[in-house]
Image (cartoon, rainbow, N blue to C red):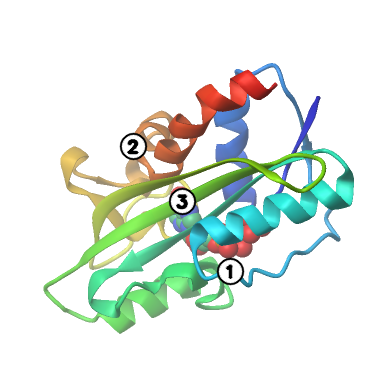
Amino acid sequence: KILIVATGNPGKLKEMQAYLEDLEIELQLKPQDLEIEETGKTFVENAALKASQVALATGEWAIADDSGLAVEVLNGEPGLYSARYAPTEAECIVRLLKELGDHPNRNAEFICAVAIARPDGSIALEYQGICQGTITNEPTGIGGFGYDPIFYVPEVNMTFAQMSAELKHKISHRGQAFQGILPQLQTLF
Ligand code: ITT
């Protein structure tokens, strides 16, 4: 069986491939011209929508990830709009730091929903993972992608961008979601 990885985000793709590499599943990339409108009201809804549409369009199993960063004092923003908060990843960080200013409450959480759809578009599995942290005052570290340089995890005293890929995989929102879904995925394939 083939599993289509339904993302156009290179940073996400790399991490998704790493979680799936030990399974004996043939992974394929989603056709580049296949764009899905994210009209859901939750991460789980959007992940399901993306997996479902890519599965239907390709006639194969598909896996999708919908994720984002929710900042407490910004009422959960950028949240579902994390990818569209500014034109580039660097500008997203600049905007978030500006919106937050020197506010003392810097609590935030990263959320990741993963969904797997059957070739007929029906959802076989979905799971959500969360990672709690705080927003730094300035970008720190060079690893990862997106908001990683400003997301600090107190337990390990590092931003996501300072962690090895292995450590991020263990504790991140995506890590939690994949740890939830992998055992069940193995029974499907
Ligand atoms: P696809 O829909 O094609 O998968 P996307 O980038 O549009 O790609 P989302 O709508 O799920 O995906 O947006 C998620 C955004 O949240 C992403 O663009 C990053 O800015 C941010 N994000 C998610 N996970 C992250 C992580 O582990 N580290 C840093 N930023 C992350």
Residues marked 2 and 1 touching at CB (< 8 Å): no
Quarter of the image where the N terminus is located: top right
> Sequence-wise, which precedes: disc 3 or disc 1?
1
113 on left or right of 26: left
> Is residue 7 visible from the viewing direction of this image?
no
Which amino acid does the dot numbered 2 rest on?
Ile
Left/right placement of residue 56 relative to residue 49 reads: right
Where does residue 176 sit, x and y in percent of width and height?
Answer: 40, 38
Q: Which image quadrant is residue 93 in?
A: bottom left
Considering the numbered disc 3 on the image, is that residue within a helix, a strand or a loop? Answer: strand
Q: Nearer the viewer, residue 21 or 92?
A: 21
The disc, 2 or 1, on the residue closer to the chain's N-terminal end is 1
* Percent coordinates x, y for residue 112 in the rendering: 46, 51
Residue corresponding to mark 1: 40
* Ligand 1 quadrant assignment: bottom right
Give the residue pinned by disc 2. 171
Q: Which residue is the site of mark 3?
A: 112
Q: CA distance from mark 3 to mark 2?
A: 12 Å
